[in-house]
Image (cartoon, rainbow, N blue to C red):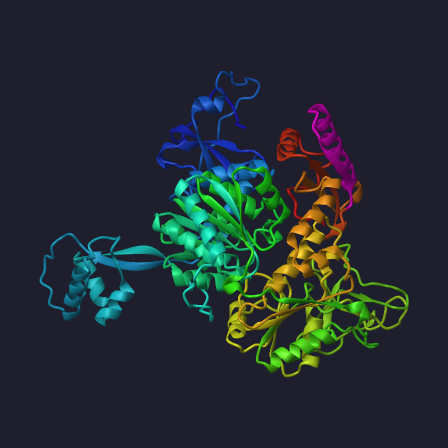
Amino acid sequence: MTDQTNNLFAPPDGDKSCTNIVRVAFESGVDREFDYLVPDDLLPLQIGQRVEVPFGKTNKLCVGFCVNLVSPQASLGVGKVPSTKRTFKLKQVHRVVDSQPLLDEQLMELARWISTYYICPLGQVLAAMVPSAVKKQAGLKKERVVYLSSAEPDIPIRSKKQKQILELLQSRGVVDQDSALAIKDVTSQVGCTQAPIKKLAQNKIICIAERQTLAALPAIPEPMSLRTEKITLNEDQQKALDHFDTQLQQGTFGVTLLHGVTDSGKTELYIRTIEHVVKEGKKAIVLLPEIALTAQTVQRFSDRFERIAVLHSGLTSAQRNVQWQNIRANHADVVIGARSAIFAPVDNLGLVVVDEEHEPSFKQDTAPRYHGRDVAIKRAQLASAHCILGSATPSLETLHNCKVKGFYHLVSLPKRVLDLPKPQMKLVDLRLQEIPATSVNLISEPLLKGLKDALAKNQQAILLLNRRGYSNFVFCPSCRHVLHCRNCDVTLTFHKKQISGAAKRTVMGKHMDYGYALCHYCLSRTLVPEKCPLCGKGMAMIGYGTQRLEQEIKSKLPKARLARVDSDSMAGRDYYAVLRDFSSGKIDILAGTQMLAKGLHFPNVTVVGIISAETSLYLPDFRANERTFQLISQVAGRTGRSEKKGTVYVQTFLPDQPAIQFALKDDFEAFVKEELKHRINCKLPPLWRMANIVLRDPTFEKLESAANNMRERIDQVVLADNLTAVVRGPVPPVISRIQRYHRLQIVIQAPDAATIQRLFERLRRQKPVKPRVTIATDIDPVNLL
């Protein structure tokens, strides 16, 4: 969309000469781009650079991305007569922010695809693709440098230190600013102050300049003990590697699903395939679903590749900028990181690897709401590269694509490396376990015995409970009062403090002195009364989390060295240090959330305990069964990864639930077959495609009116274009209010992505919904919560 005028290029008095137009996308929710005149003295200007321009009625200076260079005819509209009803001149670019483009042509094309497919303004997409640390130039420092002048010295040099400085510069060939040495390095090597350097500069024998440098700590974690012996591929691995080599030799785009059981050697295949790519002079990107997985993965890759870069949110701003700049300067052959690493400025891309492709954490939960796996596939397509999707429990979407899309391939690794046996799965029916009258028994007798046996043999264990905090909610058994969040329609989770303090007293009475209630959605905290504010009886802790599990382990196994791993305990702590201690045997038991379920390799782990296998099943979401099967299978794979046999204790109150039974039998194919029956009947992914529109506002009446308006528009487009679609809502989602915003959602189901795109293309061209409320569109949502 462009602003048009018949006197577009007539500059007002005092304006600079402008013969070019640039199209700018802003980092805002404005779903359009704007044209600006470019002063000739700011040329050349390239797509991907940022510019500062006046915007709006107040001409506030805003920064946006240059997304197109427009000819005058294109801006006016070829074959169109400019409107005479409204004439105005285009505003001018104030300055160019970047010395060179932050995004190349391929990444710009990827941004346009994301904007179109995920229904997001192009400016917001571009803002998400470039790390804020890069835009702010984090870690950028200035240092003074020296180099030899081209002029011959007019006066003799008698000072010993001055002579030594000149000899140093001459021996290093420091003849220009590019090869200049930092003054601090010169003074350190010569052993002098800056006085002789200043004297040489005054006599114009050397030149002093200023140079920008990036300084940050290394982003590569310290080594952990890993299997370092030479690995010989088994027959299945060799077949998979041959397939990858064949695909790479063809030099065309393709996708391969590497379906390998846990500890089947998928990472070794990634490394060997990347070695092939690097040998051909190309580069690779490896995506991991969790920052936690980067520790061991980066270590394995750094042992095999000299030039690697790491990108994830666990880095400091300076580290992130350094890594990004190294990638752009072609100093890295392999980029490893979380989902946003797919936007790394890698040129000559030959391979993209998405490990644990089924993980929902690859889905971005803020605009642009892209799926890292699907964006990785698109980027590989744009680069004519190959994409490998690896998983022990692939998503149903990827399995479906292998059946219906010709460029998808399926390669299986059905056995563990070294032909190691899979761990023994033991079901613990908690309905049959004795429940203490005074407390919750999180560790059953069979699991406790297994832990004691492992510790007696100096072996290690991992315990999984996918719930943070101490208890799920605070409850009054007498009057049934439950402590709710004042901002969200959820119960508060009780968290214990490290150190108890003096009990506080308010108008509501005395409060518990050893913790607080936390909302996991708005993060608000509140004190917890010892007595119910309604009836005066004692409050009780209902449910359980990792803090209560930690407490019970310490009570039942007081000599065990324990570490709790969840987002609370790891806040401000070095996660890599915990893994190093566990790897070296300084920790006996790791207990935590799903951070422990994937990708970690510890050969001495012989016991895995799943405290509550049905946790995910309580979520009212159509993927609950799939996630339950995946989580059990993934965490079970953390044990039995050496000659020491592994045992998995699966505790549950729902032992007959199909997803749990299929996981116990390790029967993935049967699970998929059963799950697809329900998906087909309900027209759910992967057979049908889905979009979710979530509207929110502090005033429910205003929200309801806007939601009904949106539903009417959708129905009109579906009817006018004769689209095949099922539209549900507006209805409240499971959590109907978050951060004092009421929420309503409209769910759209269609047989293919083209129908979804056609619908939203029409909706996108319409005027904003009235009354104005906040609207978020999620294409291919991973949940409907």
Q: Position of residue 499 (x, y in %)?
A: 67, 77
Q: Give the range drawn in magenta.
A: 703-732
Location of the N terminus by quadrant is top right
* Left or right of residue 198: residue 772: right
Q: Where is residue 288 in the image (x, y as percent from the top left)?
A: 53, 55
Q: In which quarter of the image is residue 291?
A: bottom right
Q: Inspect this view and state whether residue 477 appears.
A: yes
Specify the principal SS of the magenta part.
Answer: helix
Q: Is residue 171 above or below residue 45?
A: below
With respect to residue 548, does 175 lie above or below? above
Q: Position of residue 180 (x, y in %)?
A: 25, 57
Nearer to me, 776 or 633: 633
Q: In this view, does 57 lie to the left or right of 749?
A: left
Name the residue at 69% across, 64% down. Answer: 467
Asked if residue 334 can be seen in this view, the reply is: no
Q: Front-most of 299 and 420? A: 420
The answer to whether residue 602 is above or below residue 85 is below
Is 489 located above or below residue 758 in the figure? Answer: below
- Whether residue 724 is in magenta: the answer is yes
Query: Residue 634, how many percent across, how many down?
Result: 61, 60
Q: Does the magenta stretch include residue 382?
A: no
Q: Which of 11 and 779 is in front in this view?
A: 779
Nearer-the-camera pick, 31 or 554: 554
Location of residue 682 (image quadrant)? top right
